[in-house]
């Protein structure tokens, strides 16, 4: 497939980066992954907000507008035949001499990748508790940065097709290798708090908003794995796989794809994928639905 590198469409095999790019040398780079639905990059405003925050945190001198990123996605999508896909927007710090420098990075390198989506989504998965602990964020909060060895080491530990589930060094449930972790018990949706060091997932935030609209109480906190294993339903979330129910965590079984709340949340999620740019827009949609209902009375 073709990629968009610093504004130019190039064949993936022809793309080049400098060996002096600090994204390569020191992991100084961040990225966002998202997918398109009928050409629409779902929740793109949330992704751009998180990306800009991460760039500011790393002192990489680049700020994106939503319109800019949407145009980039449209350009690359057309160059690759117009199909929907998995997109990764990657920003590395750029070229600088070997060594650690406190000054901001002023000439970052920007690459947008597109990857083919699987022909069918994952119906359900099994989970495994990892022996490797979730590493702590390098600053006050976890960024979606190039520092991914903790995730790769964890992926090597789990059986093929299963989702590895991290615990913190203190034994609290954290997140999956490439996902956030949520579970339902007695009409309450639980998920580890961001203070555990997990990534502030965009799909996680979307599901929390949908769950609240659906009448579930939301509780974010510090939970042991025993709390998760007592759940009625468990699922994981990320922007590419969406909402994936777990049918088991090791020897404990769950309804998986047959879970009531999982089905409700998946259905509600799908109703917004071709149009929603930001999670906050759900509230205006809800007001519009209430207004329409009143007109019909």
Image: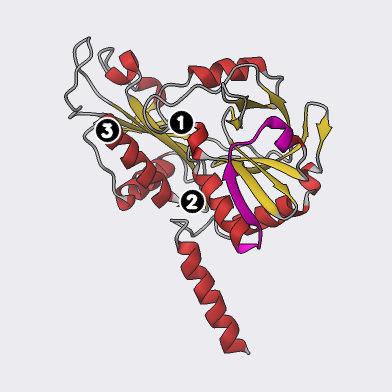
Nearest the eye: 258 or 139:
139
Say which mark, if any, is on residue 1: 1
Residue 120 at least partly seen:
no
Residue 19: image location, x then y, percent: 28, 12
Nearer to us in this view, 193 or 208: 193
Q: Is any atom of residue 225 visible in this view?
A: yes
Coordinates of residue 190 in the picture (x, y in percent): 64, 45
**Quick check: 216 above or below 1?**
below
82 left or right, relative to 214: left
Q: Residue at x 29, y 49 (%)?
A: 65
Would you place residue 82 above or below residue 147 in this image? Answer: below
Which badge, 1 or 3, comes first in the chain's sequence? 1
Q: Nearer the viewer, mark 1 or mark 2?
A: 2
Image quadrant where residue 295 sits: bottom right
Disc 3 crowd rating (10 Å Cα; few below 14, some 14-19, many 20+) is few
Q: Which stretch appears magenta?
A: 213-228
* Separation (CA) of disc 1 from disc 2: 21 Å
Label 3, label 2: how many angstroms apart (C-alpha)?
A: 23 Å
Q: Which mark is residue 6?
A: 3
- Residue 232 placed where, x, y %? 78, 45
Q: Would you say the residues marked 1 and 2 are in contact, meaning their CB atoms lie under 8 Å apart?
A: no
Q: Earlier in the sequence, mark 1 or mark 2?
A: 1
218 magenta-colored: yes
Q: Identify the disc placed on residue 47.
A: none
For this rendering, which residue is in front, 11 or 213? 213
| Horizontal and vertical percent position of residue 88 | 44, 35
Query: Circle 1 sits in a helix, a strand or a loop, which is it?
Result: loop
- Residue at 54% over, 22% down: 151
Give the residue at mark 2. Answer: 42
What residue is rendered at 69% in x and 31% in y? 225
């Amino acid at each position: 497939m073709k990629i968009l590198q610093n504004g130019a469409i190039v064949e993936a095999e022809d793309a080049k980066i400098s060996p002096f790019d600090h994204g390569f040398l020191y992991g100084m780079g961040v990225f966002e992954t998202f997918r398109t639905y009928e050409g629409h990059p779902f929740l793109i405003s949330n992704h751009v907000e998180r990306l800009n925050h991460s760039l500011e945190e790393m002192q990489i001198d680049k700020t994106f507008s939503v319109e800019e990123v949407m145009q980039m996605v449209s350009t690359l999508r057309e160059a690759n035949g117009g199909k929907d896909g998995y997109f990764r927007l990657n920003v590395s710090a750029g070229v600088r001499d070997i060594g650690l420098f406190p000054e901001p990075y002023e000439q970052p390198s920007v690459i947008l990748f597109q990857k083919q989506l699987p022909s069918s989504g994952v119906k359900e998965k099994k989970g495994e508790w990892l022996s490797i602990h979730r590493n702590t964020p390098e600053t006050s909060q976890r960024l979606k940065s190039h520092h991914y060895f903790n995730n790769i080491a964890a992926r090597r530990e789990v059986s093929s097709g299963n989702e590895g589930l991290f615990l913190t060094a203190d034994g609290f449930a954290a997140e999956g290798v490439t996902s956030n972790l949520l579970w339902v018990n007695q009409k309450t949706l639980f998920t580890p708090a961001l203070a555990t060091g997990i990534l502030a997932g965009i799909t996680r935030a979307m599901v929390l908003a949908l769950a609240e609209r659906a009448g579930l109480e939301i509780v974010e906190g510090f939970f042991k794995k025993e709390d998760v294993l007592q759940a009625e339903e468990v699922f994981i979330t990320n922007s590419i796989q969406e909402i994936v129910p777990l049918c088991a965590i090791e020897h404990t079984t769950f309804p998986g794809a047959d879970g009531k709340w999982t089905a409700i949340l998946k259905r509600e999620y799908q109703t917004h994928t071709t149009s929603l740019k930001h999670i906050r827009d759900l509230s205006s949609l809800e007001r519009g639905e209430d207004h329409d209902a009143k007109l019909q009375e």
